Amino acid sequence: MPIPTDLARLQSPEWLNLALAERFPGVRITGVTPGPIVSRVSTNARFEIEAEDGLPEGLSAHLCGKGYFTEAGAGARSTGAFEVYFYRDLAAATGVRTLNSLYADIDPQTQDNVIITEDVVAQGARFLEPTSEYGPAQVAESLAQLARLHAATWLSPKLADVPWLTPRLHAIADVRGVEVIRTVNFDTEIGAGVPAEVRDAERLAAAYRALVERSSRATPWSVIHGDAHVGNLYLQADGRPALLDWQLTQRGPWYLDVGYHIASTLTVEDRRIHERDLLRHYLDHLRAGGVEPPGQDDAWRALRGGILHGFYLWGITQIVVPKIRSELLRRLGTAAADHDALTIADH
């Protein structure tokens, strides 16, 4: 089935009838009312549908389509493929709270890809920003969801050789590095809150390359989210957090998600007070998911790998507004200093 390359085609009744036919055989959509559009790299468009004889059971009238339809998005559409694969092939099996995908597919030749999900905003959900207020109790909730994802995929033989899950953090290390970290962030006002002992672009890049090498062959592994900051969460109408934006999904060690999530989501003060308890909470949920977790001391040492992962990702970030970059770099940089995370390259 052809993947739409523009929003008008995605929102046409003709294409939607084809796309939704597998889940809802015989559906006949007769009208589409476009709604709000958010277009940065990807384009996210909400819309409402009507159907002949009414909508079938389980099909919401309020939907959202995601694709890469703009000039800016065209160069990044291949990254959307991993999110498509996650929703199409894996999300339901993990049981993790995330968007309910009704259709997700990709053209393997052009890499054009789209996802159709239920519109959770119409259900009362609230999307978060990377610096949204988010307390320790909420972090415990989202760590439980990460534990569910990790436990469901822990050393899974079915996933061990799946190509789209191949570890690929080396690509991040290769695309941008020292020059961006130094000139765009560390040597500007944006990096002013990063402690001096870790505000060293060369050392950060070297430490991250060592982490990438280590994590690519780490065991045990699971499927990880890969970019677990609070801006990649939304709160459901009942207030419970759910995960989204799965472009960095891949096989990897648990700590890449957990260390990053704790250090980026909490204020420095809250992290210092609660991080040990939150780590224990995560490990308890792994155990409840049928996984024998690492010991507390080993897990505490491993946590710095996730802190380093998040610190590097925000060190190379350019297009997010300066205020957000500054705060995330302060949080992650302080955590990196507290955990001596840059010494990974020294061992």
Image (spheres, grey):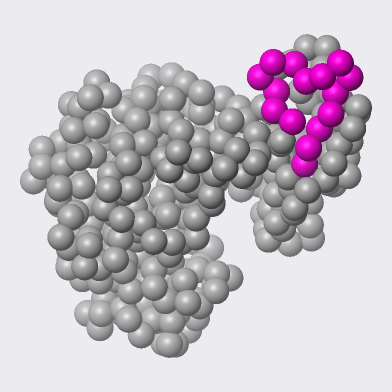
Q: Main secondary structure of the magenta part?
A: loop
Q: For this view, does 340 lie left or right of residue 323?
A: left
Q: Give 302 or 108, whichever is nearer the viewer.
A: 302
Q: Is residue 192 visible?
A: yes
Residue placed at 10% from the left, 38% from the top?
295
83 versus 94 height, above or below: below
Which image quadrant for residue 61?
Answer: top right
Q: What residue do we see at 85% from left, 23% from top?
A: 51
Quadrant, the C terminus: bottom left
Can you give x and y, in whole percent of width and height, for residue 58 in the image? 66, 19
Residue drawn 55% across the image and 74% down it = 321
Can residue 181 be seen at all in this image of the molecule? no
* Residue 200 screen position, x and y as percent: 31, 79
What's drawn in magenta, residue-wise?
47-61
Judged left or right of residue 324, residue 105 is right
Q: Is residue 170 left or right of residue 30?
A: left
Quick check: is 149 in the magenta stretch?
A: no
The relative height of residue 40 versus residue 217 in the rendered view (above or below) is below
> Measured along the vertical axis of the image, is residue 62 above or below residue 191?
above
Viewer-closest of 38 and 238: 238
Task: Give the quarter of the image for residue 320.
Answer: bottom right
Location of residue 159 in the rendering, given as x and y in whole percent from the top left corner = 44, 25
Q: Which of the 4 quarters of the picture holds residue 2? A: top right
Q: Is residue 202 above or below residue 127?
A: below
